[in-house]
Image (tube, rainbow, N blue to C red):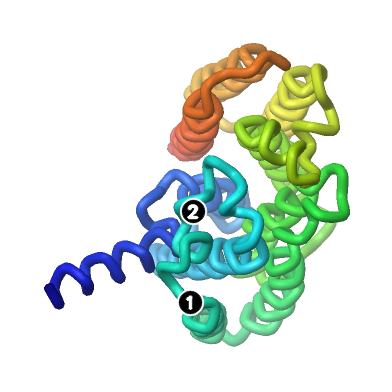
Amino acid sequence: MVLNNMKTKIRAWIELLRWDKPTGRLILIWPAAWALWLAPIAPPTPSIFIMVVLGGLAVSAAGCIANDLWDRHIDPLVERTRDRPLANNRISNSAAIILLIFALCCALEIVLCLPTQVRSLSITLASFAIIPILLYPSAKRWLVLPQIVLAFCWGFAVLIPWGMITGNISTDFTLWGCWLSTLLWTFGFDTAYAMSDRRDDAAIGIKSSALTFGRYVGLIVGTCYGLAGIIIAIIANSQELNGGFWLFWGVTFGVMIKEAISLDCNERPRYFYSQHFTRQANLGGLLLLALLIGRAT
């Protein structure tokens, strides 16, 4: 009995952190890895890469907890989220807040372990990142395009690793091009993901870009993916990556556009949009593979 209760509790904690859904962690890690392999000092050392991954997991955990705390009264009204641990009271609010603070402390500890020459910049960037990460879940209450806030959260996944490896945030086109591509890609895939909740969101008065764009949502998502691909191509051309990169780049963004075209204003099963999200995570990894190959010679 005690063992079963412990297993149930552990399962609830894993769900709160979203560790049972690795796709959401990967889709954050990929832009960070893009930045590391596009930076002037590439590839990164194994220690820097590991710290970026661990930091991403800690911040992602904090963001998921903050999201569920904000939405604990809304989630029970949405089919996709009604079984979340805070929504069905499997975890208390106070326990979730303690875990949120712990996750943020873990992220801070990772930053404090960085070399002295890059530590100050990384702390500054991480401090600025915390604001949109903790406030993003509230955006759906007051902003017609709340996915913009999430996109800026993802943008820090580019800025912080870049600062960790270079020690500065310059006007380098590679940096800001990668940042903008990440914003566009994130806004696109999160808009597509929000399509699964359109009916529930409309019923309870929650805002989303999927609702705001209406029948044009597929066009907007496709435009975001297309622009992200063009910017990455300009960066790759400026860095003279080899031909292997272009093969994988073409496949990655070709499939992204195909995925966007499949989005329309007609209602589809919820799993359709979850599959779109999963495929975007896979394509983000494919783009990283393209960069690895492009840097190989």
Is disc 2 surrounded by few (<14), some (14 to 19) or many (20+) residues within 10 Å? Answer: some
Q: Nearer the viewer, residue 54 or 270?
A: 270
Is 133 positioned to the left or the right of 76 in the image? right
Residue tagged 2: 43
Do callouts 2 and 1 mark residues in contact (Cβ within 8 Å)? no
Q: Position of residue 169 (x, y in %)?
A: 76, 65
Question: Rounded to the nearest whole Å, what is the CA distance between mark 2 and mark 1?
Answer: 43 Å
Q: In percent of the image, x 83 and y 43: which residue is there?
A: 145
Q: Position of residue 36 (x, y in %)?
A: 56, 54
Point out the image quarter for the N terminus.
Answer: bottom left
Q: Is residue 140 above or below residue 96?
A: above
- What kind of residue is marked 1? Ser
Q: Nearer the viewer, residue 271 or 284?
A: 271
Look at the image and tell me whether residue 283 can be seen.
Answer: no
Q: Position of residue 245 (x, y in %)?
A: 52, 27
Residue tagged 1: 92
Q: In percent of the image, x 46 and y 39: which residue is there?
A: 292
Q: In percent of the image, x 65 and y 19: which residue is there?
A: 260
Q: Nearer the viewer, residue 49 or 244?
A: 49
Is disc 1 surrounded by few (<14), some (14 to 19) or many (20+) residues within 10 Å? Answer: few
Q: Is residue 15 above or below residue 193?
A: below
